[in-house]
Amino acid sequence: MKVLVPVKRVIDYNVKIRVKPDGSGVETQNVKMSMNPFDEISIEEAVRMKEKGVAEEVIAVSMGPQQCQETLRTALAMGADRGIHVKTDDVLEPLAVAKMLKAIAEKEQPQMIIVGKQAIDDDCNQTGQMTAALLGWSQATFASVIELGEGTAKVTREIDGGLETVDIKLPAVVTSDLRLNEPRYASLPNIMKAKKKPIEEMDPASLGVDTTPRVKTLKVSEPPKRQGGVKVESVQELVSKLVNEAKVI
Amino acid sequence: MDLTLSDEQKMIVDMVRRFVREQIVPLEDKLDPDADELPPEDLQRLSKITQDMGLYGLDTPPEYGGPDIDLVTRALISFEMSQHRAGLYAPCYGAFGGARQAQLFEATEEQKEKYLYPMLRGEKKVFFGLSEPSGGSDPARAIQTRAVRDGDEWVINGSKLWISGADRADYGLVFARTDPSKGRGGVTCFIVETNWPGFHVRRVVHTLRSSRYATELQFENLRVPHANILGEEGGGFSIANDRLTRQRIPYAGECVGVAIKAHEMAVEYAKIRETFGAPLASRQGIQWMLVENEIDIRTARWLVLEAASKADNGEPFRTESAFAKLVAAEASFRVVDRSMQIHGALGVAKDLPLERWFREMRIRRIGEGPSEVQKHVIARDILGQSLR
């Protein structure tokens, strides 16, 4: 089977995010970018499926500007077989990404799409679910274990109350959670091989998708600075503050 | 000269940076601030990762199983792998393997079996015995240790100083004078096993580098088989010169890596530390220190890459490598010093790695050829070889 894995280029998790002075967004100039960590987990899972012989081909997809090819090369160096780059300088919202993934999935016919549960830049946590809905496929979100059967998959999901196991029919969209696996480091031989692996370029129009944003960003601002704590004298004072000032009880 | 990184180089740099950040730095939080070794199980686990990366044995030539990378890439890796507390003298605590004694690659097949391969496999430890109490930078003249032939053996008498790891080594290279009538051409390199009679570690010499000491060695009628001569008799200094010049480049690169990290810490700290109601970063005095750090790092980084690039292109790079070593050690020392100053009292505390880098970086200006010897090499290039 084929496995499709979208990989997003995001600000590296180690970078301290700075808001642009005009409040229009966050600073991305001269900022280190990397693959979204949840997408690395997805790639790792797909590559392991291939190593076990249950997947034949792993295709990485990235959408965005030219530099997304670096992210794709990283996926290829981790073991993906080929890349698809949907090249655009537009701002992409989850719905647009999901529509493009649907178009690619219809063309490539993968049995599974493994999507990171969220991207660490906008933390939307929507793309996987939307893609499944648009395709009419089964979905299993927040996966910590994926076991493949005959045309089915058993997925352990991380939910608030603990773990939930679901059986789903393939084709399916699975979103990966942190504990699904520990992604490997790329290796020198695979980095060298990655150069020769193909990356196909396309654009949103060729996929028939209108990427016009539906959400308007009014203002981006830093979270308010934390205020210092207060020491209370008695339980009465604590309760009164919780009721009257914090208004939490 | 175009030193734009290729996509592959960017990925390799990324991979090593992540390895340091995710594997080394968290471990270091639990280690003694002066530690330069990991518990064996950790080292084994990390070496397995670097093997999977295909980067184990960074300084081992590909024909002996090392990774096939050029010197520019090796330099880029050295900028990354030193960015942690022990990074200057124990980059990644040896998880990338080591091939310390480049001369052994020039050994005979028989010697390789006995001495090179066990070292490459990490089974045996090897020391390098060149410097003597009479000096180390001008060994051709300073070497007084004598080797006299007796049938199929040589009898060595004399002493060595500032030798690292000889007390824990299984064997090592000892340079001794075999012909007193000749200067450079009268010195021979011997492979000496540390358990042979007449080999003594006379004392341990503590230095600024509190994690590791040096030793003083004494040879008393130490008998070495003729077959243990490395290279030619009288050719002690002509072995592996090219390899040794190459080694100087990652050595310089490690200095730059530490400087990059120290500077990064200084920039962060200057922005958050407030004095008299404003962040340090708003003070011009501090800003200029940060700018000077940046100049030092950029200069050193460029010179290291230039030397590596010349070597990769097959051009002479002896002078360039001297520049790289000289500037990297001196500039990185200044960067660590300024970064420490910006941190104030915190800078000298063992809570941060700065104090260790400061002590160890001081040694870098002396080790692997002191700055003055590098200048001597450069001066010879400017003024001609005949210069004394």
Image: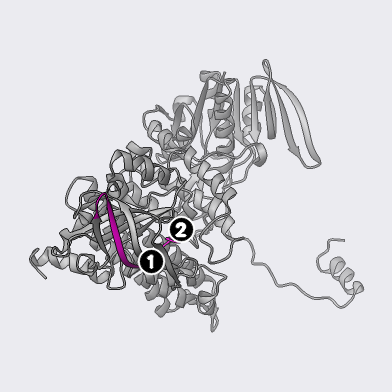
Are discs 2 and 1 located on one and the same chain? Answer: yes
Q: Secondary structure under badge 2?
A: loop
Task: Categorize mark 1 by other alpha carbons within 10 Å: few (<14), some (14-19), many (20+).
Answer: many
Residue at coordinates 54% horizontally, 69% vertically from top-left?
B352
**In the foreground, B254 or A59:** B254
x and y, in percent, of residue B226 in the image: 27, 49
Task: Please tell me which residue is depicted at 57% across the width and 43% down the height of the picture.
Answer: A37
- Spot occupied by residue A186 in the image (x, y as percentages of width and height): 47, 38
Camera-side residue of B40 and B95: B40
Q: Give the position of the C terminus of chain B as an image quadrant.
A: bottom left
| Chain of the residue under label 2 | B
Q: Is residue A91 above or below residue B198?
A: above
**Mark 2 crowd level (few <14, some 14–19, many ≥20, 10 Å Cα):** some
Figure quadrant of residue B128: bottom left
Q: Residue furthest top?
A: A150
Extreme residue toward the front, this view: B151
Q: In the rendered image, is residue A105 in sight? A: yes
> Which amino acid type is marked by label 2?
Ala
Which segment is the magenta one?
B150-168
Foreground of the two, B147 or B384? B147
Residue wearing tag 2: B90
Return the residue at label 1. Answer: B217
Chain letter for the residue marked with disc 1 in the picture: B
Say which amino acid is labelled 1.
Leu
